Amino acid sequence: MSDSKTFPFPGTYRHDCGHTHDFEKGSPVIACPDCGDGTGTTWTWVAGDVSPTTVMRQIGLPSGTLTLMYTGVPPVSEESQDEIDSAMRMFSRDCQMMTTWFVGIMASRSAMRGHLEQLASRGEPLRITTLRPDGRAAAVLAEMAADEAIESIADAGEFERLYANSFVVSTYHLWEETIRPKIASALNVDPSHVKADLMGEWRLLRNWIIHRSQDAEDDFFERAPTLAGALALKRGDPSLTAGSVMVLVRHLNNMRIEVNPHSLDMGFALEPVSPEMLADVARSLEPGTGTIAPASAGIAPSPAIIVFDDVLATVHERDCSQMEVQRRSSVDSRELMVSDRWVASSVVKLLEQEEQRCEECGAYPT
């Protein structure tokens, strides 16, 4: 079995039904011996020879296990645990639903092809229309040549590749805009602390599909080794197929989510702060360290990040440059998260002025 189907720690685990059982590290995840429930099984680690602040929750799937590990999080209420389980099940259900519809549509291509060939023989196009109550066409919503439609539904044709790419984009946004914030809210941490290696690579694949740029392509092949190897894509074309979707779904069914809010105690401001104050914080940072300092009591939905080294500071949007920020900040760089781009730009300007100040008289350039 894979790691995601085994208990990661030795000790006692509590099942949803309330019964507890002891398992060794590496033991396979099983249905509860008392209630026999193996569908949607959730085990919570409650005691053992590891840090008592580490908790595991798992959702059993038909062909895998979705796992959440959180460390260094204050005790979570039963209501919050339910919210976590609900978010994890929502993610699994919606992904499986998209997969089911895709497979169903692909299976109906034979019947579609027969109808399209009849239209082509009569020289008629394929039309998608709305209908009046009496069954007559009311308005044409879409139209394409029958021969073109036949070609598009062929194996690995345009329809298959378009849907497969849409599956990647939709799944990522489901995770990023819904599931990740829900888990973060239940654990009372920032969404940036909710991480999944699979979704990190998934983001790079999504970027390549959307932007079709050389930089996005290079990022995927250099920084997404698991998906790049599993999908066997070639450079120059990020188009996926039905087989690609099946590979991705198998990875989704065994996804591992980790939460470790290591920076919760590193400078959260409880009151509004000024760019001048943030610039002072930035100057105090040592290379290789990071501080989160929002410009208000809560972090805005799409904050900006300042990444800087000894002499250079640049501003990045968090959602599009997070992986780049993490890579740069790991090599003698520092980062500072603020509430919006305007504040970030103001901080950078102050830092640039500091760098240009005369060492002899202390005056700034005019």
Image (cartoon, rainbow, N blue to C red):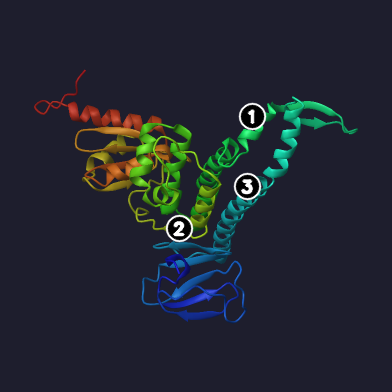
Residue 187 shows in this picture: yes
Q: Nearer the viewer, residue 246 or 357?
A: 246
Name of the residue lying farthest toward the front: 121
Separation of disc 3 and disc 2 at Cα?
A: 26 Å
Q: Nearer the viewer, residue 309 or 340?
A: 309
The image position of residue 208, as x and y in percent, is 43, 37
Looking at the rendered image, the disc whose residue lies closer to the viewer, 3 or 2, is: 3
Dividing the picture into quadrants, the one containing residue 323 is top left
At label 1, counting other C-alpha atoms closer than 10 Å, the crowd grade (few under 14, some 14-19, many 20 or more) is some
> Which residue position is annotated with label 2?
257
Residue 195 shows in this picture: no
Is residue 314 found left or right of 32 in the rendered image?
left
The amino acid type of the residue labelled 1 equals Glu
The image position of residue 210, as x and y in percent, is 48, 34
Could you say whether the residue bearing mark 1 is in a helix, strand or loop?
helix
Q: Earlier in the sequence, mark 3 or mark 2?
A: 3
Looking at the rendered image, the disc whose residue lies closer to the viewer, 1 or 2, is: 1
All told, the count of numbered labels is 3
Separation of disc 1 and disc 2 at Cα?
A: 43 Å
> Which residue position is annotated with label 1?
148
Name of the residue lying farthest toward the right: 134
Name of the residue lying farthest toward the left: 360
The amino acid type of the residue labelled 3 equals Phe
Residue shown at the point (73%, 39%) measured from the top left: 114
- Figure quadrant of the N terminus: bottom left
Could you say whether the residue bearing mark 2 is in a helix, strand or loop?
strand
Separation of disc 1 and disc 3 at Cα?
A: 20 Å
> Which residue position is annotated with label 3?
102
Q: Are marks 1 and 2 in contact (CB under 8 Å)?
A: no
Q: Earlier in the sequence, mark 1 or mark 3?
A: 3
- Figure quadrant of the C terminus: top left
At label 2, counting other C-alpha atoms closer than 10 Å, the crowd grade (few under 14, some 14-19, many 20 or more) is many
